Structures are given as C-alpha cells and as structure tokens.
C-alpha cells in the first residue's frame, strides 16, 4: 500500500503547468496525429501554446522528456498494431532485398539526427518555425499528390529508399512531419496513394523504434523530478490508447483519396499560429519543439 509520502512524489504540484488532465489531452491528440501526415510533435507544442497553458515554465529537458513519453506510448501501440505486417515483411520470399531497402531509408535520418539533434533543439522549434514547416510540408504534399499514380510498393528500389530516407531526415525541421515528408517523396516518385502510404509507414518503423528506444533510455538514466511521474505516465497511456483506437485511419490513408485535406488542415493550423503571433508579438515566440519531431 502506497504511503502518503510516495504519493506526494507522484502527484504534481497545484501550480505545475503540466497537469494530469492536460497531459492526458495531449496524449489523446498524439495518437491520431502520429498516424496522419500532420505532425504530432507540432500539435503537442502548438496546442498548449494556442490555449495559453504556459508550458514554458517547464524546463526544456522536461518538455523534451514529455514528448519522448508520448512517442513511447505511440510506438508501443504501433508495434502491436503492425505486428502482422512486420511478420509478413519478414516472411516475404525477397525479404533480404526489402530489409536492405529499409536500411537505406533509415540511414539518412539516423545520421541527420546524430549530427543535427543538438543544433535543432537549440535554434529551431519556435511557433514561427513550426508554422513555416507546416506550410512547406502542406505545399509539398499538395503538389506531390498531383503526380500520376503509376507504381506499386513492389516497384520500390534503392533510389526510392534513399529518397524516403532523405524525406525522413527533413522531418527534423519542426512541423514538416515524418509521415507527410515520406508520403510526399513517395507520391513525387509516382507511387499510387495506397502504396505511398504503406511505404511511408513501413520505412518509419525502424526510425520510430530506434529513436524511441534511445530517447527512453536517456530519460530512464536522467530520471524525473517529483510530481512529473503521474502526468508523464497518464500522457503515455493516453497516447498508447489513442493510437490503438485510431488504427482505422491507416486504412483510410490507403484508399485512393486525395491528400489535399491534410495539406489544407496543416495550412489552417499554421495560419492560426501566425495570427496569434501577429496579435501577441515576440511574447509568444519562446516555445520550443525538440528533435523528437523526427518521429512525427
């Protein structure tokens, strides 16, 4: 039975900006935002900022750690949801070729994350740069989706894998979105929408697993201050649950439907951000998004 002292270490202080309800709300948003090409990490940063939650009162490392907790919940849910697909990949007659393609698609984001993670965390991630990333990603996605649909996932080769890897690396820029970038790259190379969605998801699995594992180990070594455990746990749990409950969105993405609605939504979120920046001025520019947006 827990003692009052141990519960006090778990329970956030009354004036703590990341309360359990807020952490839960962000976790619930994170799951579907991760499955769609709209940048989950941008939502985790912009929603509190737009609502005036003042998460800047949390230390930067603590905000980054909370993002890691949300990604850990999402990654665990994706591992469960995608288990049959992973088994199918490993059971393919040409699985060695496919694993080589996955390795090619993983190398650019892994290298970029190793070299650029710290500079990005130090210099990027304010609401203006997130808005720019959202708009760039929106325009690229809309233009790419005009390309003809000529290729299937079985046509993917080394060149396609490298382009998808570079797209994942570009998602280090806040607001770009890993899913949006890889969908854009696949459609630019004339893959059919369903195949582009599957390629986007499959090349992301090693990146999500590797980055989440590394960041979770760092978080475990660093530990959490008193009062952070319960919001972090509820946020991760909500992210896990919302991801599992949103897996039907994967089937929706793999239908032959225009990607323009996602581009439009991204633009509207960016415009809402820019409008608030215009009305509030420099006071609203300090929130930062960590390089965990590589997973988004």
Image: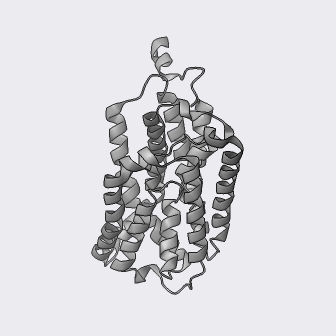
Q: Nearer the viewer, residue 288 or 228?
A: 288
Q: Is residue 134 above or below residue 126?
A: below
Front one among 218 and 129: 129
Q: How is the image coloured?
A: one colour
- Which residue appears at 48% of the width and 61% of the height? 178
Kindly indicate the quadrant of the structure image that contains residue 105. bottom left
- Residue for point 31% across, 54% down: 115
Disc count in the image? Answer: 0
* Res. 260 visible in picture: yes
Rendered position, 104 above or below 293: below
Q: Residue furthest top?
A: 4
Question: Residue at left 55%, top 20%?
Answer: 13
Q: Quadrant of residue 256?
A: bottom right
Seen in the image, is 211 located left or right of residue 124? Answer: left
| Image quadrant assignment for residue 280 | top right
**Looking at this view, is 187 or 156 the one in front?**
187
Percent from the top left, x then y, of residue 255? 61, 74
Residue under the image location 37 percent in, 42 percent down: 216
Q: Is residue 243 visible?
A: no
Residue 211: image x %, image y %?
37, 51
Q: Point out the residue furthest to the front here.
A: 282
- Left or right of 243? Residue 278 is right
The spot of residue 2 in percent (x, y) is 46, 17
Indicate left or right for 86 with 228 as reference: left
- Residue 236 appears at what percent x and percent y? 50, 40
């Amino acid at each position: 039975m827990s003692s009052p002292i141990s519960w006090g270490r778990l329970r956030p202080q009354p004036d703590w900006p990341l309360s359990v309800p807020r952490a839960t709300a962000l976790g619930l948003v994170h799951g579907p935002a991760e499955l769609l090409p709209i940048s989950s990490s941008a939502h985790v940063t912009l929603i509190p900022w737009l609502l005036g939650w003042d998460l800047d009162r949390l230390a930067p490392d603590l905000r980054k750690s909370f993002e890691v907790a949300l990604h850990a919940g999402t990654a665990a849910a994706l591992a469960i949801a995608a288990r049959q697909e992973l088994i199918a990949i490993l059971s393919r007659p040409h699985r060695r070729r496919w694993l080589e393609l996955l390795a090619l698609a993983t190398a650019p984001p892994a290298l970029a994350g190793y070299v650029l993670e710290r500079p990005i965390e130090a210099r990027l991630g304010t609401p203006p740069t997130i808005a720019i990333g959202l708009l760039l990603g929106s325009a690229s996605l809309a233009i790419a989706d005009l390309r003809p649909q000529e290729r299937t996932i079985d046509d993917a080769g080394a060149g396609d894998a490298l382009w998808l890897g570079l797209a994942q690396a570009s998602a280090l820029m806040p607001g770009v979105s890993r899913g949006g970038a890889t969908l854009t790259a696949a459609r630019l190379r004339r893959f059919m929408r369903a195949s582009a969605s599957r390629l986007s998801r499959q090349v992301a699995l090693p990146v999500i697993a590797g980055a989440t594992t590394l960041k979770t180990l760092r978080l475990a070594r660093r530990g959490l201050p008193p009062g952070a455990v319960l919001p972090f746990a509820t946020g991760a749990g909500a992210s896990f649950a919302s991801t599992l409950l949103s897996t039907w969105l994967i089937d929706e993405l793999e239908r032959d439907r225009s990607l323009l609605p996602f581009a439009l939504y991204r633009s509207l979120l960016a415009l809402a951000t820019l409008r608030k920046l215009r009305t509030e001025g420099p006071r609203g520019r300090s929130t930062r998004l960590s390089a965990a947006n590589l997973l988004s």
